[in-house]
Image (cartoon, helix red, strand yellow):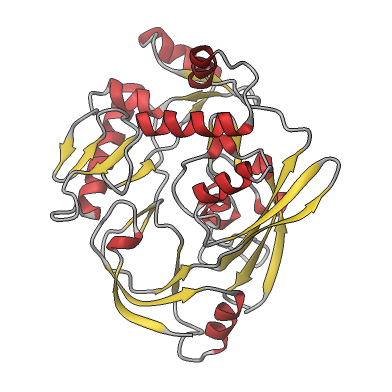
Amino acid sequence: MIVESNVPLQPYNSFGIVARAQHLARITSEADLAALHADPAWRDEPRFVLGGGSNIVLTGDVKPLVLKVEIKGRRLVEETPRAWIVEAGAGETWHDTVEWMVRSGYPGLENLALIPGTVGGAPVQNIGAYGVELQDRFDSLDAFDLETGRAFTLDAAQCAFGYRDSVFKHVRSGPNDFGLAGRAVITRVRFRLPKPWKPVVGYLDLERKMEETANFTPSAVDIFEWICAIRRAKLPDWRVLGNAGSFFKNPTVTPEQCADIIARDPKIVHYPMDDGSIKLAAGWLIDACGWKGKSVGNAGVYEKQALVLVNRGGSANPVTGGEVMTLAKAIQTSVYERFGIRLEPEPVVV
């Protein structure tokens, strides 16, 4: 178990923000976590868990010990008449894992193609896109408790999934609270992919693809490739233009609140939810406030999608975390002043 010092983090965050880790340990197995816990030099040190770095904003150097999760491996665990159970290591790239599953004959995650990040980060955020959320395809996960040094397993109910939320995003506030933020490292994730497979194509972009291709009975591979094409047309490649994907959560309001907003802004994009609430498109709200294409320093709002903040300085003169957060707060203020809605950021600010 080797702990590196003074490690540049610019290659490990999708915004391309310059920062350093005072100390960094590469976690390639559960044994590495056990070794760190047993080492008196590191056992009681604060830690910061880093996966793909696609959902973070670094506002300075990271003083806690960075645990860079690089646990690999993919396998079919079990096949039953009702589902495939597939497992992947937390350090596997999410998109590559989705493609491997789809092309290996284990469909169900194709709507989540091309989302940046790692497998281990997916349940933390309960990622979702185009009508599918991770919780819809989740079986269980393995994790390591940094406090006790013990491995444990959680099912979907224990993960307490919500909209872009899970138990891993909440700090324990008392002895009976199960918050796991800063306490647990996810090591492996298992997915339950239902049989028979049914395509999820209820989004306008996918309906357009069916019309364009005259393919009204698409396979999982077809949908995977359509989703990749749709996302590439709308969203910047973080390797070319640094970003953290969707920067704000889509807010939910009551039907009465939505009716009030529609009375003032009839074109607002909104979607009814199963619980009776209404989800509003955060990108539309931001665009309506005139932010698309605007910048604060080297932090900008992407021209094709107002929900995405980007690094306009590139690798030579990269954006700072302070610039990103200044822009984000200005957007939040604009949206609140016009619509009375508080936008909540998706990325973790470090």
Q: Which of the two residues, 333 or 243, is positioned nearer the viewer here?
A: 243
Residue sitting farthest toward the right: 81
Instruction: State the residue at coordinates (39%, 35%).
Output: 343
Instruction: State the residue at coordinates (68%, 58%).
Output: 75
Instruction: State the residue at coordinates (38%, 34%).
Output: 232
Say whether residue 6 is left or right of residue 95. Answer: left
Quarter placement of the C terminus: bottom left
Kindly tell me whether residue 38 is visible in this rendering: yes
Instruction: State the residue at coordinates (58%, 24%).
Output: 277
**Quadrant of the rendered structure where residue 293 is?**
top left
Tell me residue 87's x, y (percent). Answer: 67, 56
Compared to 218, does 87 lie above or below? below
Tell me residue 276's x, y (percent). Answer: 63, 22
Tell me residue 266's x, y (percent). Answer: 39, 8
Tell me residue 249's x, y (percent). Answer: 44, 37
**Quadrant of the rendered structure where residue 136 is?**
top right
Kindly tell me whether residue 257 is visible in this rendering: no
Q: Which of the two residues, 303 or 160, is positioned nearer the viewer here?
A: 303
Q: How many marks?
A: 0
Q: Which of the two residues, 17 or 87, is positioned nearer the viewer here?
A: 87
Say whether residue 316 is left or right of residue 48. Answer: left
**Quadrant of the rendered structure where residue 22 is?**
bottom left
